[in-house]
Amino acid sequence: MKIKETLTEAKITDLLNWTYEKSINGLPGTDSAYELAENFLAKHDTTDKAIDSLIRWQNTKSGTSGFLTGLGGLLTLPVTIPANIASVMYVQMRMIAAIAHMKGYDLKDDQVKTFVFVCLTGKSATDILKQAGMKAGQLAARQAIKKIPGEALKVINKRVGFRLVTKFGEKGIVNLGKAVPLVGGVIGGTVDSIGTNVIGKTAKKVFV
């Protein structure tokens, strides 16, 4: 069965919401986005240096075989999504959320949540925001972002869902995460470090 046939916008939306909650609260054995952010902030004298260090670490770590091993909490996914797609999304979303937290954004705000979702689309983020009448790095300012109406957020979320379905459907999961087997309830595999790097830099640009 093709990935495209198994993924729908509704499933992606459910996965995005589930993964976001796990990213900010953490999975068993992993740091939450808050803890990840504070750990890197404590090691550097500026926020930008901390963010760059986080992105570098994530890229290096993500490219290591077995990095995703042990994300057992992903086995309780509420939707039928390949475990490797879910694990890749978790790793990358947690990084984005950590960057947003470092920049002083409240991860509990719906607007911030939507912008984290947008960053997952990487290079497509600018186009998605432009289609919604926004510019990355301008309306994402802390005060302006809170004024974005709920209807606009729904439009953006829908575009993100469509983009991710297309992304996984056309290219499969090769460009983000290698197909990994579920052996004894353990998820193994790697995350494409190039894609993760683009997403990290996108988040740094969006959350100003």
Image (spheres, rainbow, N blue to C red):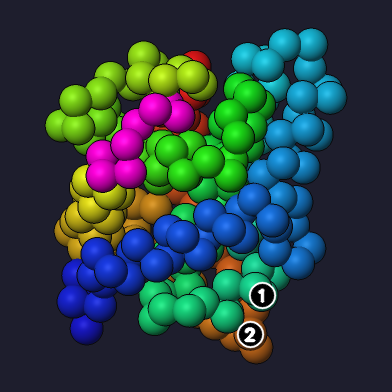
Q: Is residue 163 magenta?
A: no
Residue at 32%, 71% (x, y): give it. 11
Cα separation, mark 1 vs mark 2, equals 7 Å
Q: Amino acid at mark 2?
A: Gly
Q: Which of disc 2 and disc 1 is earlier in sequence?
A: 1
Q: Amino acid at mark 1?
A: Gly
Compared across the picture, whether 104 is left or right of 128 comes to right
Circle 2 residues within 10 Å: few <14, some 14–19, many ≥20: some
User: Is 19 above or below relative to 112?
Assistant: below
Residue at 51%, 47% (x, y): give it. 93
Residue 185: numbered disc: 2
Residue 72: numbered disc: 1
Q: Residue 190: image x %, image y %?
A: 53, 57
Q: Is residue 150 magenta?
A: yes
Residue pushed farthest bottom? Answer: 184
Compared across the picture, whether 187 is left or right of 135 comes to right
Q: Residue 58: image x %, image y %?
A: 61, 40
Name the element at disc 1.
helix
- Magenta stretch: give its range: 145-152
State the image quarter where residue 37 is shown: top right
Circle 1 residues within 10 Å: few <14, some 14–19, many ≥20: some
Q: Is 166 in front, or is 64? A: 166
Name the element at disc 2.
loop
Residue at 72%, 41% (x, y): give it. 34
Kindly check if marks 1 and 2 are in contact, taking CB atoms under 8 A apart as contact: yes
